[in-house]
Amino acid sequence: MAGKLFSFKNLIILLLLIFAFTIPCWVTSRFILHIVIMCCIWAMAATSMNLMMGYTGQINLAHGAFFGIGAYSAGLLILKVGMNFWPALILACIITVFVGLIIGLPALRTRGSYFAIGTMCFNVIVTVIIDSWEDLTEGARGLLGIPRPAPISLPFGMEITFTSMPAMYYLVLTSLLLTIWIIYRIVHSMLGRTFIAIKGNEELSESLGISAMRTKLLSFLISTFFAGWAGVLYASYIGFLSPEISDYHVTFELLIFCMIGGLGTMVGPLIGAIILTIISELLHGIAIPRMVAYGFLLVIITIFLPGGITGGIKMLWLRWNRKGEQ
Amino acid sequence: MSLFIQQVLNGIMLGSVYSLVALGLTLEYGILHIPNFAHGVLYMAGAYVTFLLATAVGLNFWLAMLIAMIVLGLIGILIERLVYRPLMLESHLSSFIAAIGLIFIFVDGALNIFGPDFKRFPPTHTQAFHILGVTITLQRIIIIGVTVILIVLLHLFIKKTIMGATIEATAQDREGAQLMGINVKRVRMIVFALGSALAAAAAALIAPIHLVHPGMGGPVILKAFVIIILGGMGSMPGAIIGGFIMGLVESLSGGYISTSYNEVFAFGVLVIVLTIRPTGLFGAK
């Protein structure tokens, strides 16, 4: 698989990249471009959640909170401190990781269901604090008027601005690709193997000299970093933040993206986020009980298609191949 | 002083409701070994069923509550049969996700059927008593009294009947119970019916005091989780004691400090306990 530059897999990746980069050339509708941008932001958050949940096997139900913390830190740094977007982006990610450290240290002492519920409680606490600390966050009124990223000036008097939709799209797409690439490299490195070992059997991997606490914390912090980053992009793109953006419903939504796409695979969260974001954006105007349909979909998929969409495709592929051999 | 007594009484009343919800949750955890996230929506559904029976049908409070418990017990059995049983051998994560799906179905279903507005229950048992400078309504006394009766009945059921013994045996050792000829599938169904009926009872009791709305299950279920973590998952005394502690913490912090940080206090307690003892106060190492 590895080593061959012109493999079938690389060809598909190349085609997909070309497709992704040329979208603004042939899509003129602002609405469709908006959906594509939202897909990228959610895919980024889902991919980061996947590192902790799919590869390290820890059900972190505070991920939406980190998305919200990233978004709010950037919004506050830009609006209240008057920072430029780019340093605010970096600082917001650092703040998110720092909060992740404070939450992760006690939470990661617990395991399994305890960890899931403990992190969920953290998520609620974060939302309540954002909602109630009105002097800082404006509470339920929300943060209004977060500007788009500041232009970057290049030599020879050139400038990259982010006021247009395509420019914003390229920023978000680049961030998504960077996230995927970094997480891919991590997962396929020695470090990634220790993550997967922890998922397989925590006691056994500890007996092999892996520090479970340190490994889990590292995976947790990396995933919060990218969640925060995705949050910053969301804040700057949408321009408005309310406490709901850190709510545990966001966590649930990210979880669903991962599950429906296929947990523990690189493409799973991408597929899940893209398909479900498109569905939910398209269903926005239609008065059908969207969440009821979502709920049924979720229950049915977990029962009949435990590996998600990628798991299903893989199963079909194997069956088809076996038939070919016979 | 009278403020203190008033808050303590409120705390005991809230604690009763939390205990009932947490008892159902801890029973289910003991048997299934998964936290049933969908427990909160059953609580909400119980409140709506009671509300409908009391207003649209015009039954009296006690009958409405009893029927709601039966209806929710049946819904509990259905959920176990249709959703949790097929996932019995899958990882815990699958059950989590399925439960989240159930939450969506119930909460959004209630939103679409009953609308997002808060429903006010017809006032029942409004007689007030004045003791030691404290006012307490009959409904609050009923909440505490019925909770005590239900807890005693549950205890007797589990300790004195064969069916109860099968539940306890399955909770202790599923394979062992199976080898002794206990029908574990039936035990799962009974436990789900019991848990859901207890949630419905809790919701029916509190409905005349609080308002009925689609999102009412969320905060309660989170607190119930905190309670069963504090009390040790699967432990019944832990759930009862934890429930009352939670009620008291909530009403005292609400009365003396601030109600808007209500949840922060409740979950703060959890975070502190888990930091010191990662498996809960009464949980096994």
Image (spheres, rainbow, N blue to C red):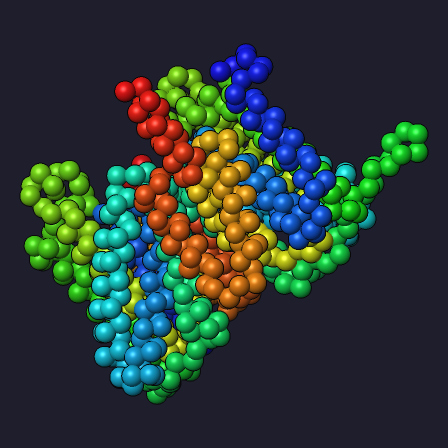
* Left or right of residue A242, residue A49 in this image: left
Which quarter of the figure has residue B143?
bottom left
Residue B3 pos. (x, y %): 47, 74
Within the image, what quadrant is residue B53 found in?
Answer: bottom left
> Residue B174: image x %, image y %?
17, 41
Residue B92 in percent (x, y) is at: 33, 41
Residue A314 drawn at (x, y percent): 39, 30
Q: Is residue A98 above or below residue B226?
A: above
Looking at the rendered structure, the number of numbered marks drawn on it comes to 0
Who's the residue at 26% across and 66% down the image? B72
Q: Is residue B150 above or below residue A98?
A: below
- Quadrant of the snapshot with the C terminus of chain A: top left
Q: Residue at x 26, y 84 (%)?
A: B60
State left or right for residue B161 relative to residue A284: left
**Whether residue A71 is visible:** no
Is the residue A130 above or below the residue A77 in the image? below
- Which residue is situated farthest in the bottom direction here? B127
Residue A28: in sight, yes or no?
yes
Give the residue drawn at x 51%, y 48%: A276
Question: Which one is in front, A269 or A96?
Answer: A269
| Residue at the image position 46 percent from the left and 21 percent from the top | A193
Along the line of sight, the residue nearer the viewer: B139 or A272: A272
Q: Residue furthest right?
A: A156
